[in-house]
Image: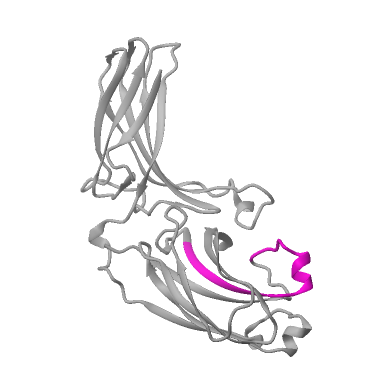
Amino acid sequence: MSIEIKFFRSNRIFRPNEPLEGKVVINLDSSISHRGIRLKISGSVNLQVRGGSAGIVESFYGVIKPIPIVNKSVEVQKPGRIGSGTTEIPFSVVLKERGEEQFEKYYETFHGGNLSIQYLATVDIIRGYLQKSLSATMEFIIESEKDTLPEKPISPEMVFFYITQDTQRHLLLSHLKLGEFKIIGKVCSQCSLADPIVGELTVDASSVPIQSIDIHLLRVESILIGEKIATETSLIQTIQIADGDVCKELTLPIYIILPRLLTCPTTFAGPFSIEFKMTIVITFQSELSKLHHKSDFQTPTAWTAMESIPLELVRTK
């Protein structure tokens, strides 16, 4: 026997003011009796722990309780019997009803390094005494209501940047200090989640050969704990825009597609916040770099130059 939830939308994206519609599909070898079939809708902001050593935020795990967003249960079928074969039971649940008291606002679905905002639909077929209930769970994705979103396109905010010896706060190799390098460019710091992050970069001068140019997309998750704020930065993805020494004064395009579940609108809530930034990393050719292939993205090295740019991500119509 098997049971599963299928939503009528293949992308599973819904908005709080829309009905959550789908069907429960049950496959049985023989008929069974039940005491009712219920569908539970739940959503919450959770603190989650990654594998490996505990970070700053993870050290508070167990202290922070999940923040409930929605928790409702509806009956989709009254007690009775389900025949053998395949049975489909449609359902429609209004997520946000007018006048209904809410725990929190509907934040967009987000799977982060330490914070997750998740919405689940769980169906339970309640059986009799000493009989195990049948259940299935499926995640659905919440996006902001269209009425609350700004019109598209939003006004792009281009940030100009330059990277030289003088902009670096960490120690550089002697041949980098004595040499000269200047990288300039611009990037859109405010962009729609449906659009790529665009910009450009130009190597004006570099007396030291360049090994690669990479862009790190980072999330910055903060949690309010009493009177303190615990903040941790983690890597979402890395995009390489140049491999090997770059021709001088050649404009390189920056084009980054945002991953859906790993990003969300920049959020500043009372107990937590979710922000994003990008770090441009210039790696110069050096014998030391060959010995350290793997290095922490947050730790500057003597053979790299870096520049970080805050990003504001928004949802548009």
Quarter of the picture containing the C terminus is: bottom left
Relative vertical location of residue 110 with respect to residue 79 in this rendering, above or below = below
Q: Position of residue 232 (x, y in %)?
A: 58, 61
Q: Quadrant of residue 300?
A: bottom right
Image quarter of residue 259: bottom left
Residue 187: percent from left, percent from top? 45, 77
Colour option used: one colour
Q: Is residue 263 above or below residue 152?
A: above
Vertical comparison of 128 with 101: above or below: above
Quadrant of the rendering where the N terminus is positioned: top left
Q: Would residue 312 appear left or right of 57 to someone viewing this image?
A: left
| Left or right placement of residue 240 versus residue 108 in this view | right
* Rendered residue at 28%/50% (across/down): 15
- The percent position of residue 166, horizontal first and vertical second, equals 65, 88
Residue 301 is covered by the magenta coloring: no
Q: Identify which residue, 199 or 247, lies in the foreground.
A: 247
Q: Which residues are magenta?
A: 274-297
285 vs 59, nearest the viewer: 285
Q: Is residue 282 magenta?
A: yes
